[in-house]
Image (cartoon, coloured by chain):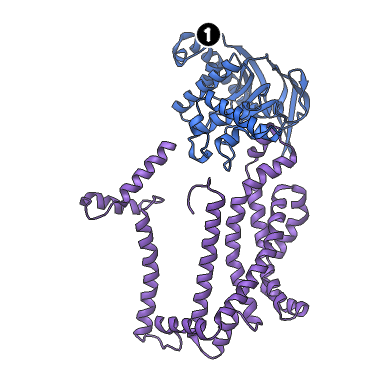
Chain colours: A blue, B purple
């Protein structure tokens, strides 16, 4: 278990021999067990921020802390899901789910028990022996989420995991994720550019502005749990959506000016 | 998508249903399906088209040769060529030539692959290796292997070593670069995910990068086998006592175009066999890889 803290993180890229400021002095905290969504237009550094938390990219200045410990590199305490399909095509669903535990040297028997249980809980048992190429995109992303939690990580980092899915599949995948989160209550940092998705999923939405990437505002979403799709049509939902949209439009206008 | 596969299968069965019972409109729509870009066609139709092409070539050959449009000194008839092929194997020990050619190929191909595959994977995976050796490999690739033949004759004489060297020279460098491409194209996120699942550098290499490369490697080995046949024949044309290339060259000296064509057809058949073996290997090793193959 652990909160995610971003402490004055600045990230400078060197692209085409020019320095690009991807993140400019960003600080934010996702409290322990909460669902945080990071939204913003392209170029706001939201994916970079996630990579810094994952330890896949070091910050130029500042630090990311998970459960109070500074991040120094990637590790199994922080599970990750990308937008692109990253299941290993040569492994069956079950073997993909067991990949993390097998790296750690968990005996096969124990691994199978765990993966059977997890897949059953998540309603994926019937696909256990399928190869990823036999699954739809939505199913692949569900398995990718299950693979990430098979290591029992403290936090989950998700980079637009449903970005490539169609609207209906996406809605199903979102409910899959909220169910899982309500059962397990891990801290989640979820990057998206879809405001409906952010408001529907999050306890807190962090609105970022582009070029350079800065944290614009933190919006606490005070909608009752568990949420079902009907919440999308309530006036409260619309208010949150309007507030975030306005923030994003303002920042876009400022960047152009 | 499991459902989609099932539906595709149903479509395929429908498409392979016997033709005559189909109403005219359905038959016409099957024709329009064949004209639609990238649309799959039924297996019987594919087989019919493939054999049709071979028959067409055979028919043209027959018309030109039996019709005596061309002197049989230049183009023998199919039956004469087939008879010659039989004679070669039955009475003139051609199988020995086929074997010595095949042996050269196997040795040279194995030597090239054993070095090219690990080196290529290292070039595509590690920037330091790439910076060190890729420019050299890329430069040598542009030097024609055939231009090295005189040098190889000086170095190795005209026995087996020289022929194997020519094939290696022609296969090794381009194969290395193709394999490097395969490993460079492994999606970075596949590696990142492994790190977030707790993998060490070594585990990322052995458990993600290598398995991700194998299908592409086998594919490129299949393609490289084709080059190996080309260089083998070049090597045998220059200097050899045995081998298919040697038989072809010898027959050419006596204007024996029947033997030349018989030899060329034999090489073609051997090429098809090795290609089919590689495809079979690919299907066996990578049952998860679906699609065109």
Can you say which quadrant of the picture contains the C terminus of chain A?
A: top right
Up the image or down, A117 lies above or below A131; here it is above
Pick the front one: A22 or A151: A151
Spot occupied by residue A64 in the image (x, y as percentages of width and height): 74, 23
Q: Residue at x 49, y 47 (%)?
A: B290
Instruction: Give the side of residue A257 with respect to residue B258, left or right.
Output: right
Up the image or down, B58 lies above or below B44; here it is below
**Can you see residue A211?**
no
Residue lying at the far bottom in this picture: please name it: B254
Q: Chain of mark 1?
A: A
Spot occupied by residue A56 in the image (x, y as percentages of width and height): 71, 32
Q: Residues within 10 Å of mark 1 (few under 14, many from 20)?
A: few
Pick the front one: A214 or A127: A127
Spot occupied by residue B144 in the image (x, y as percentages of width and height): 67, 70
**Can you see residue B64?**
yes
Q: Residue at x 55, y 65 (%)?
A: B274
Can you say which quadrant of the picture contains the N terminus of chain A?
A: top right
Q: How many marks?
A: 1
Which quadrant holds residue B161? bottom right
Q: Residue at x 40, y 63 (%)?
A: B50
Which quadrant holds residue B159? bottom right
Residue lying at the far front in this picture: please name it: A109
Instruction: Give the side of residue B40 with respect to residue B117, left or right.
Output: left
Spot occupied by residue A31 in the image (x, y as percentages of width and height): 67, 13
Residue at which label 1 appears: A224
Pick the front one: B280 or B259: B280
Element under disc 1: loop
């Amino acid at each position: 278990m652990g909160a995610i803290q971003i402490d004055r993180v600045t990230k400078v890229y060197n692209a085409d021999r020019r320095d690009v400021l991807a993140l400019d002095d960003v600080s934010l905290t996702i409290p322990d067990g909460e669902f945080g969504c990071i939204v913003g237009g392209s170029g706001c550094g939201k994916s970079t921020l996630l990579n810094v938390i994952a330890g896949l990219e070091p910050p130029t200045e500042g630090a990311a802390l998970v459960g109070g410990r500074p991040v120094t590199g990637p590790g199994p305490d922080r599970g990750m899901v990308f937008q692109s399909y990253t299941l290993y095509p040569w492994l069956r669903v079950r073997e993909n789910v067991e990949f993390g535990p097998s790296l750690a040297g968990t005996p096969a028997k124990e691994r199978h028990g765990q993966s059977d249980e997890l897949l059953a809980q998540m309603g994926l048992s019937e696909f256990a022996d399928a190869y990823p190429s036999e699954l739809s995109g939505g199913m692949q992303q569900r398995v990718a989420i299950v693979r990430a939690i098979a290591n029992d990580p403290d936090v989950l980092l998700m980079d637009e995991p449903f970005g490539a899915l169609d609207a209906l599949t996406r809605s199903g995948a979102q409910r899959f994720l909220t169910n899982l989160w309500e059962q397990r209550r891990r801290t989640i940092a979820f990057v998206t550019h879809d405001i409906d998705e952010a408001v529907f999923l999050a306890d807190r939405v962090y609105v970022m502005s582009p070029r350079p990437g800065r944290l614009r505002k933190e919006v606490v979403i005070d909608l009752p749990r568990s949420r079902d799709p009907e919440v999308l049509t309530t006036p409260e939902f619309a208010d949150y959506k309007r507030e975030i949209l306005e923030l994003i439009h303002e920042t876009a206008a400022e960047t152009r000016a | 998508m499991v459902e989609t596969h099932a539906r595709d299968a149903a479509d395929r069965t429908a498409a392979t249903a016997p033709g005559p019972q189909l109403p005219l409109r359905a038959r016409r729509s099957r024709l329009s399906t064949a004209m639609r870009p990238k649309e799959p066609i039924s297996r019987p139709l594919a087989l019919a088209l493939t054999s049709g092409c071979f028959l067409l070539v055979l028919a043209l050959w027959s018309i030109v040769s039996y019709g005596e449009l061309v002197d049989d000194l230049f183009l023998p008839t199919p039956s004469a060529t087939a008879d010659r092929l039989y004679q070669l194997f039955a009475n003139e020990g051609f199988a020995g030539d086929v074997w010595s050619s095949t042996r050269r190929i196997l040795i040279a191909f194995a030597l090239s692959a054993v070095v090219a595959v690990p080196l290529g994977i290292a070039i595509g995976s590690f920037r330091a290796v790439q910076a060190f050796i890729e420019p050299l490999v890329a430069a040598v690739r542009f030097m024609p292997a055939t231009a090295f033949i005189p040098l190889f004759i000086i170095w190795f004489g005209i026995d087996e070593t020289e022929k194997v060297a020519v094939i290696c020279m022609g296969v090794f460098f381009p194969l290395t670069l193709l394999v490097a491409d395969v490993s460079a194209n492994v999606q970075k996120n596949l590696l990142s995910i492994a790190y977030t699942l707790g993998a060490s550098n070594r585990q990322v290499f052995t458990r993600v990068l290598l398995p991700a490369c194998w299908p592409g490697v086998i594919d490129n080995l299949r393609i490289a086998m084709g080059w190996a046949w080309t260089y083998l024949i070049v090597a045998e044309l220059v200097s050899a006592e045995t081998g298919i290339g040697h038989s072809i060259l010898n027959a050419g000296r006596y204007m024996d175009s029947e033997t030349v064509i018989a030899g060329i057809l034999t090489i073609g058949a051997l090429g098809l066999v090795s290609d089919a073996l590689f495809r079979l290997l690919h299907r066996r090793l990578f049952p998860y890889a679906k699609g065109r193959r």
